[in-house]
Image: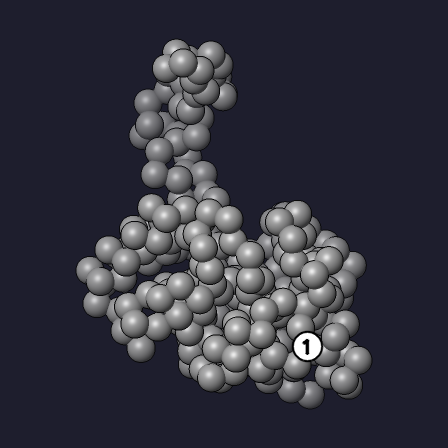
């Protein structure tokens, strides 16, 4: 039987660091456009929905091909709401209208570097590997975290790890979340299994093809990368 897959794009209205981040114009389009269109291009999803508390975001999302079958509650739209809670709510909302899925993919909305090929690759992994709960993207830190330190008043106050004097070439790469998508088994989402664990598999991205957008400077860096890579839809 063919597996059913749901894409959920969580895009609430509030954003403190970048006003209206999820629909901020990025090369002529609301930035959520890129997440929706690349999800559609992957052709792996039975449904692509946007979980939002905003009628304006819902209208824009519908225009570009996503569905908004419900509006997210205010309780799940504050600064303290975690991703897993939003995804579980969306799964339950879809089940109420008779829609059930084997796999669910959370796709972040401010995501212009999302590559449909990586979504396809992730889907092939998750459906074929029994011991994998989630597939997500990862990016290597540009400098070894073993050589990191904390400062106060421009003075070093603590060293993070004891390898501060090691040569960089002697240290292994460390990775952080690529902030593009999490594709997981529905039952793992519903049981709140950790997204980042030893049962997760990583699709590695390079620095040029990824940009986590949290601050205005991140948004500007994303524009520089996007323009230099000549990306377009």
Q: Residue shown at 47%/84% (left/top)?
A: 63
Give coordinates of residue 5: x percent, y percent. Answer: 62, 78
Name the residue carrying label 1.
70
Q: Of 61 and 198, which appears nearest the observer? A: 61
Give coordinates of residue 103: x percent, y percent. Answer: 65, 72
Is residue 121 something that shows in the picture? no
Q: Is residue 113 above or below residue 71?
A: above
- In the picture as drawn, the residue positioned furthest to the bottom comes out as 1
Would you say 171 lies left or right of 225 here? right
Q: Quadrant of the N terminus?
A: bottom right
Colour convention of the picture: one colour
Kindly state the secondary structure of the residue where label 1 is placed.
Answer: loop
Q: Quadrant of the C terminus?
A: bottom left
Would you say 135 lies left or right of 4 here? left
Callout 1: 10 Å neighbours few (<14), some, many (20+)?
some
Q: Residue shown at 24%/55% (left/top)?
A: 224
Q: Residue shown at 27%/62% (left/top)?
A: 226
Q: Is residue 29 above or below residue 76?
A: below
Would you say 125 lies left or right of 159 here? right
Number of numbered discs? 1
Give coordinates of residue 175: x percent, y percent. Answer: 46, 43
Would you say 192 lies left or right of 66 here? right
Is residue 32 something that shows in the picture? yes
Give coordinates of residue 123: x percent, y percent. Answer: 55, 72
Q: Of 7 and 171, which appears nearest the observer? A: 7
Q: Residue shown at 70%/61% (left/top)?
A: 74
């Amino acid at each position: 039987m063919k597996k059913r897959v749901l894409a959920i794009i969580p895009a609430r209205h509030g954003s403190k660091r970048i006003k209206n981040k999820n629909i901020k114009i990025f090369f002529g389009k609301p930035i959520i456009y890129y997440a929706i269109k690349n999800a559609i291009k992957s052709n792996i999803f039975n449904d692509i929905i946007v979980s939002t508390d905003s009628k304006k975001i819902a209208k824009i999302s519908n225009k570009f091909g996503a569905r908004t079958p419900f509006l997210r509650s205010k309780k799940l739209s504050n600064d303290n709401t975690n991703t897993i809670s939003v995804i579980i709510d969306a799964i339950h909302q879809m089940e109420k209208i008779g829609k059930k899925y084997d796999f669910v993919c959370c796709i972040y909305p401010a995501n212009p570097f999302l590559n449909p090929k990586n979504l396809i690759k992730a889907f092939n992994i998750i459906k074929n590997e029994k011991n994998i709960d989630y597939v997500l993207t990862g990016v290597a830190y540009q400098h070894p975290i073993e050589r990191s330190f904390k400062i106060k008043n421009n003075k070093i106050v603590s060293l993070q790890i004891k390898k501060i004097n090691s040569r960089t070439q002697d240290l292994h790469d460390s990775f952080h979340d690529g902030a593009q998508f999490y594709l997981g088994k529905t039952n793992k989402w519903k049981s709140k299994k950790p997204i980042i664990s030893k049962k997760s598999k990583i699709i590695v991205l390079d620095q040029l093809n990824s940009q986590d957008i949290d601050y205005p400077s991140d948004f500007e860096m994303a524009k520089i990368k996007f323009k230099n890579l000549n990306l377009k839809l």
